[in-house]
Image (tube, helix red, strand yellow):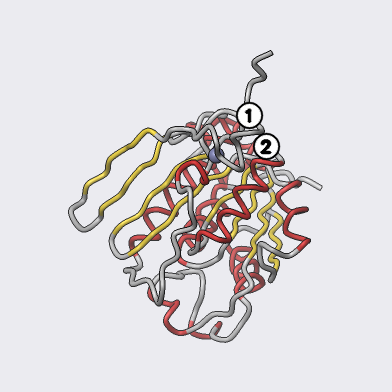
Amino acid sequence: MVKEFTPDRYSRQLPLIGEEGQEKLQKSTVLVVGAGGLGSSVLLYLAAAGIGRLLIVDRGYVDLPDLNRQVLYLESDLGKAKARTAAERLGKLNSSIEISGYAISTSDSQFEALVEISDVVVDCLDNWTSRFTVNDLAVKYVKPLVHAGVQEFYGQVTTVIPGLTPCLRCLMPRAAETSGIIPVLGFTPAVLGAIEASEVVKLLVWGKPSLAGQLLVVDLKNMEFSKIKIVKRPDCPACGVRDKVPTS
Ligand SMILES: [Zn+2]
């Protein structure tokens, strides 16, 4: 059941999105896949903005090296399951929304059902194999997918609108697997996650994300931001066939 929202809580954003926009956020279900560095940033801002129903998927546990960037967690959370811990922490930030944590992987059969019931899916993952699973389900159920990836001082963001824009398999034909630990400073996923949250809010309130079909490339070392147009691959195994217009 969708809860009523308290206008005073959102008084600093209501002039921007209106009560109608706030109601749209309150009625929305957003699935955040990955509750690490990106996920911490995305989830804090989406919970604070008043997304009515947040679904969090992460099968990991809080580890000491996570704390340089995964700002959802405290030292007292070490060893705890991330999905449930994140849900509890966010519940203390905003008790007027519904938050559920799922300690499952993207290959779990329950995951597909979560994509199906969501209005937007947010990719906060750290590997392309899982990303492709999420991408293919988002294309299958025609759910907007906001993607980000980070490494060192760098990151990228794009929004996939199935049927309209290229998908993640168009962007990256093969899973680029990184070996070993990816070095990263905490502010990189914080910035990229906040940009993902802005895409989600714009999608839900106005139906107009800024990065549909465009890849925002962020270099925080030199403080350079650039946008690159992404092209659909006609032979894309995920969206190429589905979106193909019959010629006869
Ligand atoms: Zn594609």
- From the image, state whether disc 2 or disc 1 is nearer to you: 1
The amino acid on which the numbered mark 2 sits, given as a three-letter code, is Val
Q: Look at mark 2 in the image and give the residue it sits on.
A: 142
* Residue at (55% x, 47% y) in the render: 49
In the depicted view, which residue is nearer to us: 152 or 10? 152
Up/down of 100 relative to 15, above or below: below
In the depicted view, which residue is nearer to us: 184 or 191? 184
* Residue at (61% x, 82% y) in the render: 80
Quadrant of the frame with the C terminus? top right
Q: Look at mark 1 in the image and give the residue it sits on.
A: 243
Q: Please tell me how crowded label 1 is: few (under 14), some (14-19), or many (20+) other residues with Cα within 10 Å.
A: some
Picture coordinates of residue 201, whole percent (x, y): 53, 40
Left/right placement of residue 54 relative to residue 209 reads right
Picture coordinates of residue 219, whole percent (x, y): 26, 52
Q: Which mark is residue 23?
A: none
Mark 2 touches mark 1? (CB < 8 Å):
no
Q: Secondary structure at mark 2?
A: loop
Picture coordinates of residue 76, whole percent (x, y): 53, 85
Residue ranking furthest to the front: 248
Q: State the image quarter where residue 154 is shown.
A: bottom left
Mark earlier in primary sequence (2, 1): 2
Residue ranking furthest to the left: 222
Query: Cβ(mark 2) to ligand 1 < 8 Å?
Result: no
* Structural distance between the alpha carbons of marks 2 and 1: 11 Å
In the depicted view, which residue is nearer to us: 172 or 66? 172
* Residue at (73% x, 54% y) in the render: 114
Picture coordinates of residue 104, whole percent (x, y): 69, 69
